[in-house]
Image: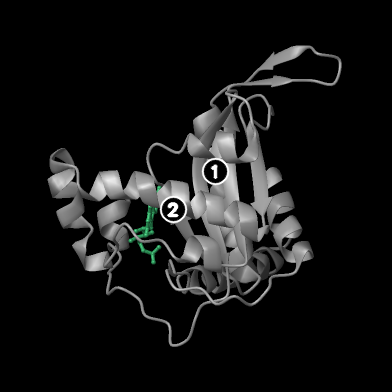
Amino acid sequence: MDTSLNNSKENHSIKKSLDFYNLMKTRRSVRQFSEKNVADEILLNAVKTAGSSPSGANRQPWHFAIIKSQDIKNKIRTAAESVEHNFYNNQSAKQWIEDLKPFGTNEHKPYLSKAPALIAIFSRTQITEADQNIQKTYYPIESTGIAVGFLITALHQAGLSTLTHTPRPMCFLNEVLNLDKTYKPFMIVVAGYPELPIVLPNITRKDITEISAIY
Ligand SMILES: Cc1cc2nc3c(=O)[nH]c(=O)nc-3n(C[C@H](O)[C@H](O)[C@H](O)COP(=O)(O)O)c2cc1C
């Protein structure tokens, strides 16, 4: 292939990489959501995107519970606020709570019942197939983390706002959703449209030279 064609292909890739960066750097965690509905199709396409991510031995060790039911959202909020109450009153988490001060978070999580959708993500330690054969999974945590990255990216590019919420422990999710212990609660992604005006904590990103080096 002639070099000018190679160069133009590379320039195209460089532009695409920059465009994507410019899109992704506008993503922020939102903590005030409006009640405006989100079409199921958007959520399902985002979950399909998450399901296309790489995983150890392609075991796809994840489960995405898309929760739109008001009753279930209320139950999750009640359980999460109880866990968060313990966290914010735990003396051994003092430094952690101090580090969270710039984000203005507290034990109250109104968005869990107000946002139109919660996506509760589980990683799977083993998966029982239709023929009752039990499949072991590999790197379930790493794989699920990558899949959640895909999910958040897909929701952002569709114009939705998200918040990664991680009350600890999260085992109440198994109870509320009636999922057995092979489903390990990983994270709650709150998805929807922001309540206006959007109020965001002031944060900075580390420079490229601080987070990377070319060897
Ligand atoms: C693993 C993980 C857990 C998080 N847990 C919470 C949480 O429980 N509550 C919350 O308000 N934000 C949570 N966040 C959001 C972070 O505070 C936020 O991503 C960070 O401050 C950077 O801000 P940005 O997302 O707007 O770029 C979490 C983020 C990650 C990646």
Residue 32 sits above or below residue 61 on the image = below
Residue 19 falls left or right of residue 178: left
Q: Quadrant where the N terminus lies? A: bottom right
Residue 59 sits above or below residue 101 on the image = above
Q: Residues within 10 Å of mark 1 (few under 14, many from 20)?
A: some
Label placed on residue 146? 1
Residue 18 falls left or right of residue 68: left
Cβ(mark 1) to ligand 1 < 8 Å? no
Q: Ligand 1 shows up in which quadrant of the image?
A: bottom left
Q: Nearer the viewer, residue 73 or 37?
A: 73
Residue 162: image x %, image y %? 52, 64
Q: Residues within 10 Å of mark 2 (few under 14, many from 20)?
A: some
- Residue at left 53%, top 26%? 139
Q: Nearer the viewer, residue 43 or 50?
A: 43
Q: Residue furthest bottom?
A: 197
Q: From this viewpoint, is residue 147 visible?
A: no
Instruction: Name which residue type carries label 1.
Output: Ile
Residue 159: image x %, image y %? 62, 75
Cβ(mark 2) to ligand 1 < 8 Å? yes
Residue 31: image x %, image y %? 42, 69
Label placed on residue 57? none
Front of the two marks 2 and 1: 2
Residue 40 sits above or below residue 15 on the image = above
Label placed on residue 165? 2
- Residue at left 59%, top 75%? 35
